[in-house]
Amino acid sequence: MNAHVAGRFMRSGLVLLLTAGSYTCLAQHDPGMRAGPPGAGQPLHALTPIELSMFNEGLQRAIQLEAVCDDCTDATPGSHLDPAKANFVTQTNSSGLGTRFNGDQCTVCHNQPALGGSGGFLVPNPQDPSNRYLPPENPMFNLIPHRKGATNIVPSFITRFGPIREVRFARKPDGTADGGVHQLFTVAGRSDVFPAAQPGTCTEELLPQPDFENEYRRDNLRFRIPLQLFGLGIIDGIQDREILDRHRATAAIRAQLGILGVPNRSGNDGTITRFGWKAQNKSIAMFAGEAYNVEMGVTNDLFTQATDESPACTADKSEPNDITRLDSDDRRNQSFFNPLHEVPDWLMFAMFMRFLDAPQPAPLSTSALRGQELFGTGPGNPGVGCSACHTTTMVTPARSETAALQSLTVHPFSDLLIHHMGKGMADDITQGLATGDMFRTTPLWGLGQRRFFLHDGRTDDLVQAIDAHFSRASRCDGDDSREGSDGGDGRGGSRRSACYGPSEANVVVTRFKALSAADQQSILDFLRSL
């Protein structure tokens, strides 16, 4: 073989083997979402009958499709839904959808590979029979923005087969830090904004969408994609001392690899926060209340004010809308005297998450077993170093009010701490102690059937996701255009904040890339078994 050609193939990650006078081409590649059952979406083992009832009711609340006003739902509020048909819900049977929102039901963003998962694809508009044979797609592309006649314009960064994305602005118009969520869609044009006697009151002129395209061109947008909800009750129960003890046990390994890792902490009680891409939320209860308000615009006990209070578009909705139910009977499915119904939707969603079991891995192939060793199983076997951040094992406390959460030995593959990931991953947003390039180590359990990776969903390929963990220290003269990093949105790096240090994952990524193609493939096979 020509030496120049052989070298080019080697640099591209390909290995050429000479066999019987012909060449066989092998390369490491992401095997893709694993086939077979999801291995996720089930309740914890050994829940009590009462806990299981609460889990099932919480699942029902997560499936419910939100209407804008209290009196304009299509079906009886709280009517029972078949979880197997959750992705085909067409009738609103809850109320409280905010004036601005990203989604109109919890499971529209949490259904891959099962209810409670991350962002997946749905049938575009199942209420139209002609659409039932179309391939599932990103529900933000057509389904959510146009439900009930809504007139939303879909931004160019929301694509038919791309990731579900939440949008944050890095800067306000005056140049000061923003970092907040700017909802993609509004209720303008929807048939349920007001009763039939007052149609067309809420218009695009009264309720304009933000100028996302201009902000996109200005490189002012930062994206987040939905995380899986599997096993969050387990993570919620892990004690701070368990997190810190596991971290201390890897001190020697981390020193060799240049990995630090620190907790993000609550500004109130100082304990470790652990939910969200930057570990910005303290608990699943806080996460649930925030999701209802920020993603669906549903005001609640934790977030009592609407994100937009435009009078012409609020449909005289009660605020806060989703609170402990105080009805004297159950005509609206909100009886104070029915234990399953008196709890508000947002808190039932938190209970659903608390009782949702962790995803179960697939049986390991020979290659995946090899990959597990190379990935590392803990301080005694660091492998190439992946487990220095993606901690393989944690234990829940011996006593819990939920007995099913007691003394569990679990494998989240996360230290639940935040790390500097460098300019290539940076979003320039600070949340708590997590500064612009810091992110929580994402739990890898359930990764085998995730569709998109990294906080912004920039890739669906594991190899590219691993590569993105590598980032050299950025220049500090305000011009990083030659660094080759575009932050995952294709807008170039020259306008991003400078002076980020190197990624803490650099040495591990370098070690991974130094492995043979076969060993790299083994790690990929292991990850896709999770």
Image (cartoon, grey):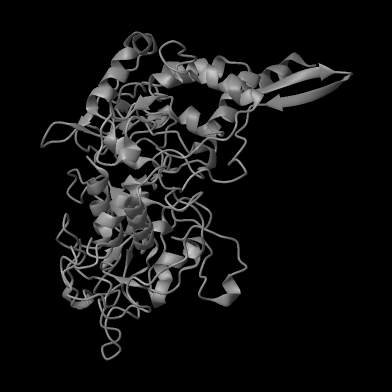
Above or below for 192 versus 522: below
The image quadrant that residue 393 belongs to is top left
Q: For the point 16% across and 65% down, which residue is it?
A: 320
Q: For the point 60% across and 75% down, which residue is it?
A: 130
Q: For the point 49% across and 29% down, which residue is it?
A: 466
* Relative horizontal placement of residue 275, taking residue 450 as reference (left or right): left
Q: Nearer the viewer, residue 349 or 400?
A: 400
The image quadrant that residue 268 belongs to is top left
Q: For the point 49% across and 14% down, which residue is it?
A: 383
Q: Nearer the viewer, residue 374 or 418?
A: 374
Quarter of the figure that contains the N terminus = top right
* Relative horizontal placement of residue 448, taking residue 50 as reference (left or right): right
Residue that sits furthest to the bottom in the current view: 197
Above or below for 265 versus 297: above
Residue 299 percent across, percent down from the top left: 20, 62
Above or below for 319 versus 28: below
Residue 508 percent across, percent down from the top left: 45, 18
Residue 298 percent across, percent down from the top left: 24, 63
Q: Nearer the viewer, residue 421 or 530?
A: 530
Residue 512 percent across, percent down from the top left: 52, 19
Q: Nearer the viewer, residue 237 or 315?
A: 237
